[in-house]
Amino acid sequence: MTEKEYNKSVETLANPLFRFIFKNLGIREDAENIVQDSFESLWINRDKVENEKVKSWLFTTAYRKMIDNIRKSKKTVEMPEFVNEKGREASQPDLRNIVSSALDRLPEIQKTVILLRDYEGYDYAEIGKITGLNESQVKVYIFRARQTLKNYLVSLENII
Amino acid sequence: MKPIDSNNIDEIMFALLEGEIQGDERDRLLEAIEADPEYKKLWRMWQNTVLNPDESVGMNTASLLKKERKKGIIVPFRIIRYSAAAAIVLSVGIYFLANTGDQSDDLVNSAKEPVKINNSALPVPKPSVNLVVPADQTSVDSVKPLKEKIKNMALDQPSENPQPAFRNQENLQEISTPVVPPNIPVFAHNENETTINQASPASPSAVSDIQVTVTSYENPIQETKSKKSLLGKVFGNLKVKIENDSNTITKRKLVIDNDKYQIIAGF
């Protein structure tokens, strides 16, 4: 990987990686630190990483650092900052906020796999490589995650 | 294909959502779901579980992650060391040449007749009168009558404490006189050549190992003392070279030449 390719990967992958980590951790500073560490590791190992596999390499590295961070801190997950499409904080609970609050209730592994699936479009095999799971396990975790989210939405609708 | 019921509705909707069911089967299932209000509501809930990234959320310092290498020339440290050493040597040499230039200007302008002194123990290729300036002949004022004194000295009888005779070329009168101290400069008049030999300070009878010849040119550039600059003194037309000389110990001699003087040092 050349310096130019590295800088290109920063432009294209820094924000998506940050959103993935931030969605999992809920703490902006920790998410930025993990992203910085991941790119620094990429720079150090740029001779070993092929340009075509940069995205999966970065997400794998960031995921492992995120898990380490969670194990070390065991902090309470803060509510992420959400802004609606018009750039204003939602005064009324909209669907995105409800889903996000439901997401925070998921176990870490389920949250990770569903974020990789929906945010980055990874298939089961790629998610398995990043998280160290096999395809069957990934599928099961995604199903359980969606089912939990669905049940939460149904319960809210029944209340409303 | 098994029918949709409450036991498999979640699995079927999940499969539809993940894209595992395609084609005609997908169309048929969707028609069945749309036909039932409860299934339709449930299908909408399943669709809301698909997350969409919030593009407004981003990393503010992402641009700082880029690597930008500064282009430049890497100079090896050893070159820097050699350059520093060369600069020091050059500075010392310039200082030395500049200071010797000041003294020579005054004495050259005041001397009228050539003075030739050879105090060297080394053989001199050309016959010349070997004269030694006594130790007391150091002041500037003594330069004028110096010729006469030297002539007289050459004809004088040996002193009470005779010094070893110098090995000189043929047809020269040997002189038993005290060895010239190493710090007595004798500068030549125009068109004349002065050879200064610095004896070793170890003992009067020690053999000198450095022979220095200072020659002034006929028409040196006349400059007032106050207008001279260091660079003008040294870098007028300064030439430094090393030539072969079979009469020296190392078979080499250093020649330094500028607009006014030519300094030849055998070593």
Image (spheres, grey):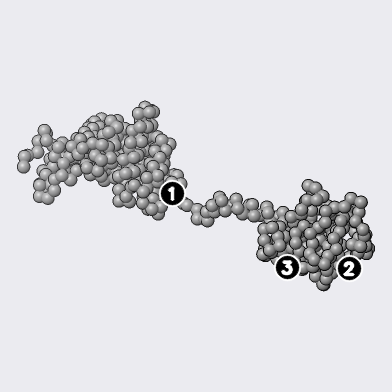
Viewer-nearest of discs 1 and 3? 3
- SS of the residue at dot 3? loop
Viewer-nearest of discs 2 and 1? 2
The x and y percentages for residue B20 are 15, 44
Q: Say left or right for B69 vs B208.
A: left
Residue B237: which disc?
A: 3
Residue B66: which disc?
A: 1
Q: Amino acid at mark 2?
A: Glu
Evaluate whether label 2 is on the same chain as label 1: yes
Please count the marks in the image: 3
- Which residue lies under the disc numbered 2? B113
Q: Front-most of B192 and A84?
A: B192
Crowd rating for badge 3 (residues with CA inside 10 Å; few <14, some 14–19, many 20+): few
Q: Quadrant of residue A145?
A: top left
- SS of the residue at dot 1? loop
Is there CB contact under 8 Å for labels 3 and 2? no
Instruction: Indicate which disc, 2 or 1, sits on the residue closer to the N terminus.
Output: 1
Residue at image coords 63%, 52%: B84
Residue at image coords 32%, 44%: A57
Q: Say left or right for A132 vs B243.
A: left
The x and y percentages for residue A61 are 34, 40
The x and y percentages for residue B146 are 91, 62
Q: Say left or right for A135 vs B242.
A: left
Instruction: Indicate which disc, 3 or 2, sits on the residue closer to the N terminus.
Output: 2
